Image (cartoon, helix red, strand yellow):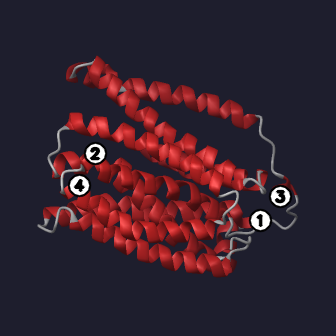
């Protein structure tokens, strides 16, 4: 039950943040999203650091008895700080100008903005798949499927995450001068070349190089996808549209990625080819979403 509540909270937290940044900094959205997503992924890096510290400080029995509670205590304290900060925020000017708010936002979204939502879900695919494959699922993939030593993995992942966070910030700066459409288009092209390269490197034993390439690609996606999907919807339906696009996209593509990849490998399919084929399919879906986004955006992005 608590895990479900945690998921619901996260599903509302991030889309609300994206919309607020988009409407609060219309001329500097790139910087706003860059700083925001740098903070989000730096949180993943903090989680890795805490996990590493706990494993060094406690044995298995101590972690099972009480050590596992420590990350939750730290997370709870950070949530209280976040809550206090949010209490000081004011509604955006764009929101205050709305006089015809839909009585049933979800019904309005499906009736009037379905193409935009489809575009948002499709483009979210590249972000959700990369974050799962390159960051969340990668340690499991390396250890359980490729039988890489956990100590090596614990050295590689923090380095990859540091470069990921730096990439997000740099992409945000670039996005102040280059439209999100161009950045995402170039990301799709780069991914079509570099994702196969990364798995070839992992197969050849250059694990750090392969993981770092995927982490850098995820950094670009993590910054530009939230920016782009906020451009798809008018202000009166923006939060509902962004939340549906982001959460459905993450559930379908990010949520299914480990299941599909693990099941396929266990069925005897290629241990390197399976995640690669999955990402190729995602790139095709994202290309379709980008085409739709360009045609149906409610906010100029080209």
Distance Cα–Cα, label 1 vs label 3: 9 Å
* Of labels 1 and 3, the one closer to you: 3
Distance Cα–Cα, label 1 vs label 2: 41 Å
Q: Quadrant of the C terminus?
A: bottom right
Label 3 secondary element: helix
Q: In the rendered structure, which disc, 3 or 4, sits on the residue that comes first in sequence?
A: 3
12 left or right, relative to 210: right
Q: Quadrant of the N terminus?
A: top left
* Of labels 3 and 4, the one closer to you: 4
Label 1 secondary element: helix
* Residue on which disc 1 sits: 236
Distance Cα–Cα, label 2 vs label 3: 42 Å
Q: In the rendered structure, which disc, 1 or 3, sits on the residue that comes first in sequence?
A: 3
* Of labels 4 and 1, the one closer to you: 4
Q: In the rendered structure, which disc, 4 or 1, sits on the residue that comes first in sequence?
A: 4
Tell me residue 245's x, y (percent): 56, 66
- Pointer 3: residues within 10 angstroms few (<14), some, or many (20+)? some
Tell me residue 213's x, y (percent): 37, 54
Q: Is residue 44 above or below residue 233?
A: above
* Residue on which disc 3 sits: 94
Label 4 secondary element: helix
What's the mark number on residue 202?
4
Residue drawn at point x = 29 percent, y = 46 percent: 208
Residue drawn at point x = 24 percent, y = 61 percent: 200
Distance Cα–Cα, label 3 vs label 4: 47 Å
Q: Is residue 17 above or below residue 257?
A: above
Please tell me which residue lies in front, 48 or 14.
48
């Amino acid at each position: 039950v608590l895990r479900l509540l945690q998921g619901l909270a996260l599903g509302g937290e991030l889309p609300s943040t994206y919309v607020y940044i988009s409407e609060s900094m219309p001329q500097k959205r790139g910087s706003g999203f860059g700083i925001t997503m740098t903070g989000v992924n730096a949180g993943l890096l903090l989680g890795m650091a805490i996990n590493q510290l706990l494993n060094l400080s406690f044995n298995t029995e101590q972690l099972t008895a009480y050590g596992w509670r420590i990350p939750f205590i730290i997370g709870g304290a950070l949530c209280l700080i976040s809550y206090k900060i949010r209490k000081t925020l004011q509604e955006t000017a764009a929101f205050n100008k709305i006089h015809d708010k839909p009585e049933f936002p979800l019904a309005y979204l499906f009736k009037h903005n379905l193409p935009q939502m489809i575009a948002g879900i499709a483009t979210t695919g590249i972000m959700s798949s990369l974050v799962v494959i390159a960051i969340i699922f990668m340690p499991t993939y390396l250890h359980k499927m490729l039988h890489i030593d956990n100590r090596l993995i614990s050295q590689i992942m923090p380095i990859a995450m540091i470069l990921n966070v730096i990439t997000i910030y740099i992409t945000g700066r670039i996005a102040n001068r280059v439209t999100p459409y161009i950045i995402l288009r170039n990301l799709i092209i780069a991914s079509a070349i570099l994702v196969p390269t990364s798995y070839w490197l992992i197969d050849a034993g250059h694990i750090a190089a392969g993981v770092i390439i995927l982490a850098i690609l995820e950094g670009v996606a993590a910054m530009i996808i939230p920016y782009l999907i906020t451009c798809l919807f008018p202000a009166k339906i923006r939060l509902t549209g962004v939340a549906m696009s982001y959460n459905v996209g993450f559930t379908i593509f990010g949520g299914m990625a480990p299941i599909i990849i693990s099941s396929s490998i266990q069925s005897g399919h290629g241990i390197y080819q399976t995640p690669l084929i999955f990402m190729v399919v995602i790139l095709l879906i994202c290309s379709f979403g980008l085409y739709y986004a360009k045609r149906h955006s409610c906010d100029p992005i080209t």
